[in-house]
Image (cartoon, rainbow, N blue to C red):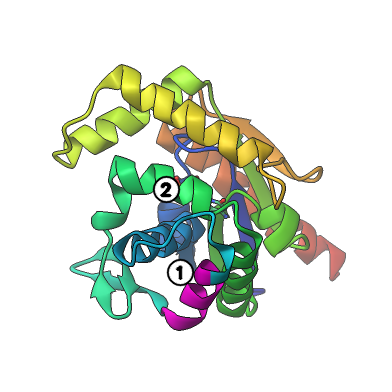
């Protein structure tokens, strides 16, 4: 059976991480959280006191650091030079810095190259902002998820709270909106829906309902392929 490249794009808080994890797990595919890669670059920059406007320093940093994905105790984790930084990359400070770092074209070039390297062979679910438009414009299946900012902010707030973070709902919603602004308005690879993406509005849908649609789409893809090869 063909090993697909599946793209899941959309703003923060639409459920991309959970959905891509489950989808990848059920299909036996690799799950590539591309946002975690940009977050890891931001963390590395912050540790070395590199300013997000210093593109030369960011480019050198990307050449130097090694970002890898691994599974520890059944959980996906991100490694920066072999150190598990999965929790550290999710603080509100790093989230804000990430939006600035992800706007740097040198950083994007380096990350896109690494994402293509990891996903090229197929059997992968990639989640991000520019997967269906820039990283893999020929992906076999493209999903674009959306939901209202209020709902997305609340979801992010509950997630952070569950992880023991000291957060406020209004501030979390404002941060989600600020990040959306930066992602949509940046010059390089802005958040944009691919024309051939299947759009799913998750405002009033729970995770199992969205998953059902995604699995249907994958099933339809294989059925159509089977018919085409007859
Ligand atoms: O999905 P996330 O919230 O972990 O993403 C973190 C940041 O990285 C967010 O500001 C959007 C940015 N990002 C991006 O620019 N391109 C991607 N492919 C993935 C994330």
Quickly name the residue at label 2: 97
Q: Locate residue 186 relative to residue 36 in the image: left or right.
A: right
Q: Locate residue 63 relative to residue 186 in the image: left or right.
A: left
Which quadrant of the rendered structure holds the N terminus?
bottom right
- 43 over 206 or under it: above or below: below
Q: Report the magenta residues as a range.
A: 57-65
Q: Is the stretch drawn in magenta largely helix, strand or loop?
A: helix
Numbered badge on residue 211: none
- 79 over 133 or under it: above or below: below
Residue sitting at x 57%, y 70%: 56
Residue 215: x and y, percent? 56, 48
Is residue 204 among what the camera can see? no
Residue sitting at x 26%, y 30%: 158
**Residue 83 falls in which quadrant of the image?**
bottom left
> Mark 1: is the Cβ under 8 angstroms from ligand 1?
no
Q: Locate residue 5 relative to residue 180 in the image: left or right.
A: right
Residue sitting at x 57%, y 63%: 55
Q: Locate residue 174 relative to residue 90 in the image: left or right.
A: right
Secondary structure at numbered mark 1 = loop
Which quadrant of the rendered structure holds the C terminus?
bottom right
For the residue carrying disc 1, how many other residues have a C-alpha within 10 Å: few (<14), some (14-19), or many (20+)? few
- 61 over 222 or under it: above or below: below
Is residue 163 among what the camera can see? yes
Q: CA distance from mark 2 to mark 1?
A: 33 Å
Quickly name the residue at label 1: 28
Nearer to us in this view, 199 or 9: 9
């Amino acid at each position: 059976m063909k090993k697909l490249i599946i793209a899941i794009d959309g703003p923060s808080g639409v459920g991309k991480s959970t959905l891509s994890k489950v989808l990848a797990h059920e299909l036996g595919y690799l799950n590539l959280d591309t946002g975690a890669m940009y977050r890891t670059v931001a963390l590395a920059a912050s540790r070395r006191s590199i300013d997000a406007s210093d593109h030369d320093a960011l480019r050198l940093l990307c050449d130097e650091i090694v970002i890898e994905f691994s599974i520890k105790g059944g959980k996906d984790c991100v490694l920066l030079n072999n150190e598990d930084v999965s929790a550290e990359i999710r603080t509100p400070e790093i989230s804000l810095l990430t939006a600035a770092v992800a706007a740097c074209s040198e950083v994007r070039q380096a990350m896109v190259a690494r994402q293509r390297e990891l996903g090229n062979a197929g059997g992968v679910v990639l989640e991000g902002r520019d997967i269906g438009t820039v990283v893999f414009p020929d992906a076999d299946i493209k999903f674009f998820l959306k939901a209202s900012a209020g709902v997305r902010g609340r979801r992010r707030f509950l997630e952070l709270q569950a992880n023991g973070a000291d957060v406020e709902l209004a501030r979390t919603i404002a941060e989600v909106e600020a990040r959306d602004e930066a992602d949509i308005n940046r010059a390089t690879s802005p958040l944009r829906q691919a024309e051939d993406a299947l759009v799913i509005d998750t405002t009033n849908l729970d995770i199992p309902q969205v998953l059902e649609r995604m699995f249907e789409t994958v099933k339809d893809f294989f059925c159509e392929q089977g018919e085409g090869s007859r």
